Image (tube, rainbow, N blue to C red):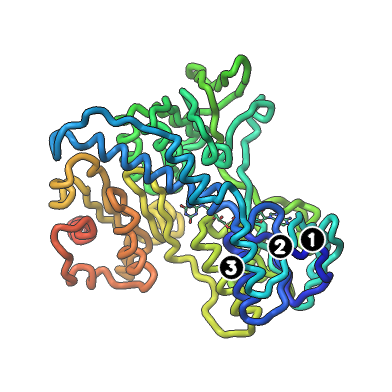
């Protein structure tokens, strides 16, 4: 049941019911607090409707095609793999997003006793928000801001006047373009670009940095670039887009000092911008500068105001939003619990090969003044990688603080790279000494056994 004329006051008001806000609002309503949750779009936010879930359905489909194409020489012959995007589009529409309908999520929140308001809230101050058509709502004890981020397009001349795609159009597409230029070679651009390429789209990825996945280890970006090139994805690395034009059903993407790319569609995947206008930041006493909402290690913005999720700038991942949500719930309920700690923040780019990473990269560790030692093991050189053969590209890299002999970061690229990451995340999180990694038994022949090889490489380099 929707409450559109909410009673203008509640114990807790949550602005934005994406992953983070929905979790806070639902848990607090469950705990018996009077909670008003306000959502401008769909309850659940970016992840289930335009992010993680549909994009990983796409990745699953693309990986199936790739596996089918790897049959020759290993398991048989392929008569011809015929991709059919309609199946993917239907799955996203029917199974992932319920045709972009959040009825189930709204009912779930209301079923917990929460009061739901559909509308775009404007923050008036630490206690008050205004929702057009509903009025001013007062938060008696807590205001939680969980407004997330939106796709940010760079100020490329001409781009704003073109019908370019963001992730939202890309995951909802029913019919694929013939050629696609992806501006931005981070996780989102690489995942979506590779899927479309595997479905027959001629994809070009344009990235300003000199490698793909520039936030991760260079070795990982290089492996992904090699695989992409082998899959006929064109890469324009270290490229600057000087302008985009659209006409006659085609886009022209101009690059500094390089040939213009002519394509049917452009996907912009260059980052995200917090959903919080400058005047609302000012209303919280924060100064008008754009950017993430500053929070302390209890997710507190200011007295009586908390924030969770992408808007805090601590890592634009669903698992960060839900982790932070649990902290805020404890805070508001007055329960004890640990403060936020991101030293073992895991993340996975679901390319093929997957790139899983936790903690610091080598460059980040060095920038912090850590005396770094590294160890690397190549997946194809391991028993499992060798027998896997087609699609076995990858590596495991360990970044160790040489003084403490503790891992401060690790990367696992390869088939199931995101799963191998699980072991490495425990090591970084629990500060397991490298000596323990030297002594433990690794099941044979697994991909995670590469951790042992990387430890040996590390020790050899330290000798
Ligand atoms: C293509 C793509 C793939 C991704 N894949 C992964 C992945 O594999 N793994 C992973 O961990 N993360 C992934 N992410 C990131 C993940 O989706 C986000 O980290 C997550 O959605 C953040 O949750 P949130 O609650 O902070 O924000 P959001 O999910 O953005 O939710 C914020 C909500 O607030 C609402 N809102 C905004 N302003 C207002 C207002 N003024 N009033 C009322 N409501 C408002 C919005 O409508 C939205 O519903 C992906 C993102 C994208 C785009």
Q: Of tags 3 and 1, which is closer to the observer?
A: 3
Q: In this rendered view, identify the residue nearer to me: 167 or 367.
A: 167
Q: Can you say whether 348 is above or below 30 in the image?
A: above
Q: Quick check: marks 1 and 2 in contact, CB under 8 Å? A: yes
Lateral position of residue 161 relative to residue 234, left or right: right
**Residue at left 31%, top 49%?**
413
Tag 2 or tag 1, which sits nearer the N-term? 2
Residue 333 at x, y percent in the picture: 64, 82
Q: Which sits in the foreground, 445 or 51? A: 51
- Classify 382 as above or below 438: above
Dot 3 crowding, Cα within 10 Å, few <14, some 14–19, many 20+: many
Q: Earlier in the sequence, mark 2 or mark 3?
A: 2
In front: label 1 or label 2: 2
* x, y percent for residue 335: 59, 85
**Residue receiving disc 3:** 23
Instruction: Using the image, determine if residue 105 lies above or below residue 10.
Output: above
Cβ(mark 1) to ligand 1 < 8 Å?
A: yes
* 273 up-or-down from 181: above or below: below
């Amino acid at each position: 049941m929707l409450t559109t004329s909410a009673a203008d006051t509640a114990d807790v008001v949550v602005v934005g019911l994406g992953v983070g806000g929905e979790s806070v609002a639902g848990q607090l309503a469950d705990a018996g607090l009077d909670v008003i949750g306000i959502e401008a779009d769909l309850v659940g936010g970016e992840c289930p409707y335009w992010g993680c879930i549909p994009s990983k359905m796409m990745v699953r489909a693309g990986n199936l095609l790739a596996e089918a194409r790897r049959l020759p020489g290993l398991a048989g012959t392929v008569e011809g793999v015929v991709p059919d995007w309609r199946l993917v589009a239907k799955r996203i529409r029917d199974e992932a997003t319920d045709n972009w309908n959040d009825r189930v999520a709204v009912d779930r929140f209301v079923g917990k006793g929460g009061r739901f308001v559909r509308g775009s809230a404007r923050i008036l101050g630490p206690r008050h928000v205004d929702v057009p058509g509903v009025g001013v709502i007062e938060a008696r004890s807590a205001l939680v801001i969980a407004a997330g981020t939106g796709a940010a397009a760079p100020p490329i001349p001409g781009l704003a006047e073109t019908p370019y795609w963001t992730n939202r159009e890309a995951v909802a597409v029913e019919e694929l373009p013939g050629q696609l230029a992806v501006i931005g070679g981070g996780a989102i651009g690489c995942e979506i670009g590779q899927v479309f390429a595997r479905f027959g789209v001629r994809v070009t990825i344009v990235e300003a940095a000199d490698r793909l996945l520039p936030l991760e280890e260079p070795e990982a970006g290089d492996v992904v670039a090699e695989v992409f090139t082998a899959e006929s994805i064109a890469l324009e690395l270290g490229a600057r887009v000087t302008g985009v034009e659209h006409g006659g059903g085609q886009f022209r993407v101009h690059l500094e000092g390089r040939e213009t790319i002519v394509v049917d569609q452009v996907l912009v995947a260059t980052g995200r911008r917090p959903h919080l206008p400058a005047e609302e930041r000012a209303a919280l006493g924060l100064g008008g500068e754009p950017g993430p909402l500053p929070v302390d290690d209890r997710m507190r913005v200011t007295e009586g105001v908390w924030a969770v999720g992408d808007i805090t700038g601590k890592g634009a991942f669903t698992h960060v939003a839900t982790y932070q949500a649990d902290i805020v719930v404890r805070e508001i309920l007055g329960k004890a619990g640990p403060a936020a700690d991101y030293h073992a923040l895991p993340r996975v780019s679901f390319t093929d090969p997957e790139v899983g990473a936790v903690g610091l990269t080598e460059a980040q560790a060095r920038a912090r003044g850590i005396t770094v030692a590294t160890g690397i093991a190549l997946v194809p050189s391991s028993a499992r990688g060798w027998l896997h053969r087609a699609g076995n590209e990858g590596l495991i890299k360990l970044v160790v603080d040489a003084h403490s002999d503790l891992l401060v970061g690790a990367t696992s690229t390869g088939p199931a790279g995101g799963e191998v990451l699980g072991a490495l995340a425990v090591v970084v999180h629990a500060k397991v000494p490298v000596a323990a990694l030297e002594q433990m038994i690794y099941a044979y022949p697994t991909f995670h056994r590469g951790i042992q090889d990387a430890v040996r490489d590390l020790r050899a380099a330290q000798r």
